[in-house]
Amino acid sequence: MPQLTDQVMVESIDKLKKEKQALILAHNYQILPVQHVADFIGDSLQLAQQAEKAHAAIILFCGVRFMAETAKLLNPDSRVLLSHADAGCPMADMITAEKLRQFKAEHPGAVVVCYVNSTVEVKAESDICCTSSNVIKIIKSIPKGKPILFVPDQNLGQYAAWKTRRKIITWNGYCNVHHHKITLRNIEEARRRWPGYTLIVHPETPPEVFRQADVIASTKGMADYAKNHDNLIIGTETGLVKQLQQLYPHKNIKALSQKAVCINMKRTSMRDVLLTLLEERNEIIIEPETARRALVSVQRMLDLS
Ligand code: 13P
Ligand code: SF4
């Protein structure tokens, strides 16, 4: 394909969307031009809910693989395309279905909660799914006294244990971006540079970080908070910070860490959006029995959300 200007790509994407009855969903961490061509931008829960109610021949998912898989589970009648074939989530790959079966065997009778950042095979082995915005509600729905296993994110599991005062046995997975690129030192520096600002962090950050925050929220929670507040320091992937800075140019919105960049979320370019839609490539196909079992855990979550 020849070099096209952004404007030509936007027009071509819009034309293809109409011709193919396609809907574009984009996560808050996508680059801004991709967010701008999307029909809906949001956090993991919002995007799953949008996918479920979509009446589209094609859903083009601009995000990472587990998100597109969740969309396919919830909307098997639409063809779901992932915006870049290599856009995965390394944390989701930190546990396999086989390892989860071993973990369950070590803790018989436990309820298995899987973060939505997991493969479809892991969801199929789990009892109930959760996202960062509903994890507290999901944990509270489990009868008291039941042992709880939480996979794959140790930090989100520890955040939920702290907030609900429930005993949760966590898998040792983590998001490299939130676990390693957002640190206590970033907080010390930010507090010194911007005194009086509100510090909001994502619950994928480690406990020593989230315990220092004024607000802990999913990316949607952060966006909602920014609607009505000013002077914010945001501790998550920089795509959301850029979105909010563009949306509210007169507000003071700072990134807690400029290094918090998810390379997988940043793989999708405008060219990828155009070519994926044009060639209808990177279609998500899920083995039917795995899909049936995984849907049970996702549907239980949505019924509680
Ligand atoms: P949200 O559901 O808060 O958007 O988080 C998704 C994610 O991958 C965070 O790293
Ligand atoms: Fe996965 Fe972390 Fe990227 Fe989110 S930011 S998609 S958890 S690697």
Image (cartoon, rainbow, N blue to C red):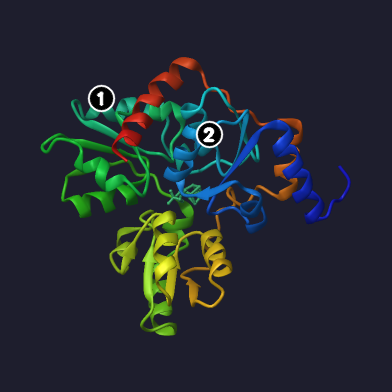
Residue 236: x %, y % from top left: 46, 61
Residue 173: x %, y % from top left: 39, 44
Q: Earlier in the sequence, mark 1 or mark 2?
A: 2
Identify the residue position indicated by label 2 in the image.
54
Whether tag 1 and tag 2 are in contact, CB under 8 A, the answer is no
Give the Cα separation between the discs numbered 1 and 2.
38 Å
Mark 1 residue element? helix
Residue 199 seen by the camera: yes
Q: Nearer the viewer, residue 148 or 252?
A: 252
Residue type at mark 1: give it. Ala
The extreme top residue here reads 289
> Which quadrant of the figure contains the N terminus?
top right
- The picture quadrant where one finds residue 296 is top left
Residue drawn at 23 percent across, 31 percent down: 111
Disc number for residue 105: 1
Side of 176 where 301 appears, left or right: left
Residue 106: x %, y % from top left: 23, 28
Image height check: is 73 above or below 93?
above
Q: Nearer the viewer, residue 305 or 276?
A: 305
Residue 276 seen by the camera: no
Q: Nearer the viewer, residue 298 or 290?
A: 298
